[in-house]
Image (cartoon, grey):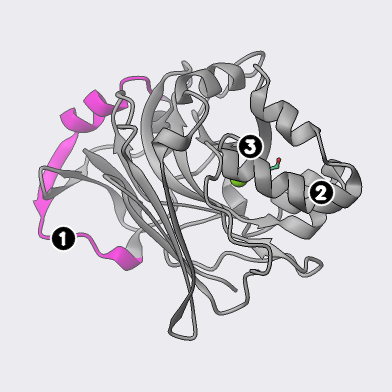
Amino acid sequence: MKLYRTQTGFFAEKDGNYFSINATDWDDLLASPDIYEHVKNSLSTRIESLDDHQVLAPVVSQEVWAAGVTYFRSRDARIEESKDAGGGTFYDRVYHAERPELFFKATGRRVVGPGKPVRIRTDASWSVPEPELTLLISSAGTITGYTIGNDMSSRDIEGENPLYLPQAKVYDGSCALGPALLLSPDPLPRTTSIQLQVSRKGSIAFSGATTLAELKREPKLLAAYLFRDNSFPHGVFLMTGTGIVPGDSFTLASGDIVRITIDGIGTLENPVA
Ligand code: DO4
Ligand code: MG
């Protein structure tokens, strides 16, 4: 079952049919460890279809956090981009360490929904989208759903010095989430594919794909680390890291269209402002 937050209310898609939901508080819904049951019991009027243009980012008061260097490809790319800053070992060490890299990514205000522009920093010269499976975690710390995330990143800034990571990662329009929340307590199959396509002036400027089999860390363990000494009364989103990094000559440009598809969840598409 999928859940959508829209300009006119909340809707669910179940077995190919769309229903409005008898619920008024998004934060209460997302906090609940029983969100699947809540939504199932709140299905109301059946509607013909959902207007894509009305779909909003599935976030209100939730914080968005992110895991990093969870795929070998990300480890490789970070080592390369930070080599002049002495980045030779720390990305490799975090890739192998028991404690994952977790960082604060965005407040709801900085997140854009489907169709809305993501931004590249005005003081960055090398920017990429990072397509990431994103977990919905209840206030009790249980994974209750999944969505698609874009962890927009300024590679020149994080490569210059790892202490600049928050500036490379957190700024207005630096994160996109949506369109749907796939509600399920079950892990997604390891064969689940994640695809990224960047279009520029009608042509494909970059495309790549990976699968969850390449994700080095269990989503459950990432969630458990996030909840160590941290509480999230409205629930929280956790991006699980990127396994797709374009080659070093690629940088995003204004007008590009970023399209991220994850099996079973859908496609998140955003223009670059
Ligand atoms: O350590 C830098 C950021 C890593 C990241 O965002 C990722 O691997 O997805
Ligand atoms: Mg990332």
Type of the residue with mark 1: Ser
Residue corresponding to mark 1: 49
Q: Is residue 173 left or right of residue 203?
A: right
Residue corresponding to mark 3: 69
The numbered disc on residue 84 is none
Residue corresponding to mark 2: 82
Q: Name the residue nearer the viewer: 137 or 96.
A: 96
First to last magenta residue range: 32-53
Q: Residue at x 81, y 56 (%)?
A: 157
Q: Report how far apart the C-alphas of labels 2 and 1 lie in the structure.
A: 47 Å
Q: Residue at x 53, y 51 (%)?
A: 244
Q: Is mark 3 within 8 Å of ligand 1?
A: yes
Q: Is mark 1 within 8 Å of ligand 2?
A: no
Earlier sequence position, callout 3 versus callout 1: 1
Q: Is residue 230 left or right of residue 211?
A: right
Q: Residue at x 48, y 34 (%)?
A: 215
Q: Quadrant of residue 247?
A: bottom right
Label 3 secondary element: loop
